[in-house]
Amino acid sequence: MISPSKISVTVVTGFLGAGKTTFINQVLKSYPDIQFALVENEFGEVSIDSKLIKGVDASQMFELKQGCICCTISDEYELVLAELAERFPNVEHLLIETTGIADPAPVISPFFKDEKLKKVYQFSGTVCIVDALNFTNQLKEDVTLKQVAVADLVIISKMEKVSESEKQNLIVEINRINPLCEISCSGRDTATDYNPNHVFYKTKFYLEMPVKRLPHSGITSKTLSFQKPLNRKDFINWLSYNLDVYKTQIYRVKGILCFENEPYEFILQGVGGSFEITEGENLSENFISQVILIGIEIPELEY
């Protein structure tokens, strides 16, 4: 559940032309009772996408121009987040639209690692819009793989324009890249399966997965299992070290953890070298912890 005292956050990513702005407009139209704010990031000197957004007061739309959130203007980005929360205490949900060429990991990571931002924001997930017509050709772009790999919900747009066999191939390909995500197939209405009140990134998931490698992308998923309760401090130190060292290789981490002297399971979520661990709702049954890593050339990690 979204905390009523915090601003929930959805990051919207996807390659150029996939339909991110269309998705945001449909969300704003579908949930008129939610007070939204929007951070728009455009790559270039002239703002175009922000003029196409309908449903957000202009004063609550923040534009980051002449650079990409994930690289050249990260400092400005975090200042904007802090300013937004201070100036607009009535905002309930923040939508962040990245450029089509952005690595979404640095966009997401402040909500895991910045303690000040964590006090006012609750990250609810990443939505990746995938263009059914062009996705196969876009797979040669590393950023396309990263956008899918870190997503909690993948929405395949323009599905009405492809055949049933092409649809199934797309679903298989996306599952290979990111076996943890939910997948929604849409036509013109891309927002049908998105609910801003749902915390997608904490959705229960299955951890028993073999190592998978895509022939062309090099994306791999690995499952680590720990057969007895973990010492919380030792495990966090170990995880922090490895995610920092291998942050360019490990795109995403997700897991269910059981700690010593703790009756409940804990949920691990991380992107781009940053992570958070929160108490879950389920009691530990067998005290086995499992962690999934998604990335490229993931090393053998020993705890």
Image: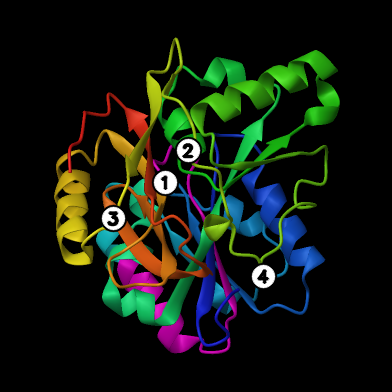
Q: First in sequence: mark 1 or mark 2? A: 1
Q: First in sequence: mark 3 or mark 1? A: 1
Give x and y (percent) for residue 266. Answer: 41, 64
**Secondary structure of the residue carrying numbered label 3:** strand
Q: Which mark is residue 104?
A: 1
Q: Which mark is residue 147?
A: 2
Question: Does the magenta-highlighted stretch encompass residue 76?
Answer: no
Q: CA distance from mark 1 to mark 4?
A: 21 Å
Give x and y (percent) for residue 32. Answer: 78, 74
| Residue located beneath label 3 in the image | 274
CB atoms of marks 3 and 1 within 8 Å: no
Q: First in sequence: mark 1 or mark 4? A: 1
Q: Nearer the viewer, residue 200 or 192?
A: 200
Q: CA distance from mark 2 to mark 3?
A: 16 Å
CB atoms of marks 1 and 2 within 8 Å: yes
The magenta region covers 77-104
Measuring 70% from the left and 77% from the top, which residue is drawn there? 34
Q: Nearer the viewer, residue 67 or 103?
A: 103
Q: CA distance from mark 3 to mark 1?
A: 13 Å
Measuring 25% from the left and 58% from the top, which residue is drawn there? 230
**Secondary structure of the residue carrying numbered label 2:** helix
Q: First in sequence: mark 4 or mark 2? A: 2
| Residue located beneath label 4 in the image | 197
Packing grade of label 1 (10 A; few <14, some 14-19, many >=20) is many
